[in-house]
Amino acid sequence: MSDEARKAIGLKLKESREYLGISQDEASASLDISRSAISLIEQGKRKLDSLELMAFAKLYQRPIAFFTEEDYSVDLDPSSAVFARSYDALSDNDKEELKRFAEFLSMRSKREDD
């Protein structure tokens, strides 16, 4: 992760904490992370592992993507959307069979491309 990305995440963490009116000491007690570590994270001077980010997100009531600015949405074409809606109505066994069939088609397609 770049220094700029770490600083951006730290700033969002700080802004979220302050918005909720939580002090660094209170965050420290809730997260079991030292106050000095929280300060360094907010300044972008300390790396943040995924478990810590998950804990911050939970405490600050924000999705992880809010801090990382990642967009995990998927754009589906209309025909794919029909399949996605139908998928929820399938039984667990049918979902498993559909998954195996999709893997089969994918492998067959790769072989045909070779």
Image (cartoon, grey):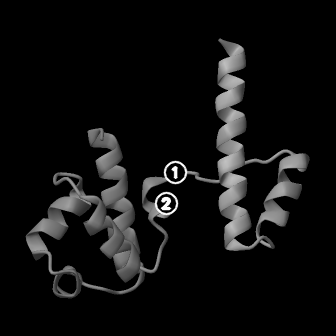
In the image, taking residue 37 as reference, residue 17 lies left or right, namely right
* Residue sitting nearer the eye, 93 or 86: 93
Q: CA distance from mark 1 to mark 2?
A: 5 Å
- The residue at 43%/54% (across/down) is 68
* Pointer 1 residue: 70
Q: Which part of the image, by quadrant, shows the N terminus?
A: top left
Q: Quick one: SS at disc 2?
A: helix
* Residue sitting nearer the eye, 70 or 90: 90
In the image, taking residue 87 as reference, residue 51 lies left or right, namely left
* Tag 1: amino acid: Glu
Would you call the spot at circle 1 few (<14 residues within 10 Å), some (14-19), or many (20 or more)?
A: few
**Residue 95: x, y in percent?**
70, 63
* Pointer 2 residue: 65
**Residue 77: x, y in percent?**
85, 44
- Contact, mark 1 vs mark 2 (Cβ under 8 Å): yes
* Tag 2: amino acid: Ala
Q: Quick one: SS at disc 1?
A: loop
Q: Earlier in the sequence, mark 1 or mark 2?
A: 2
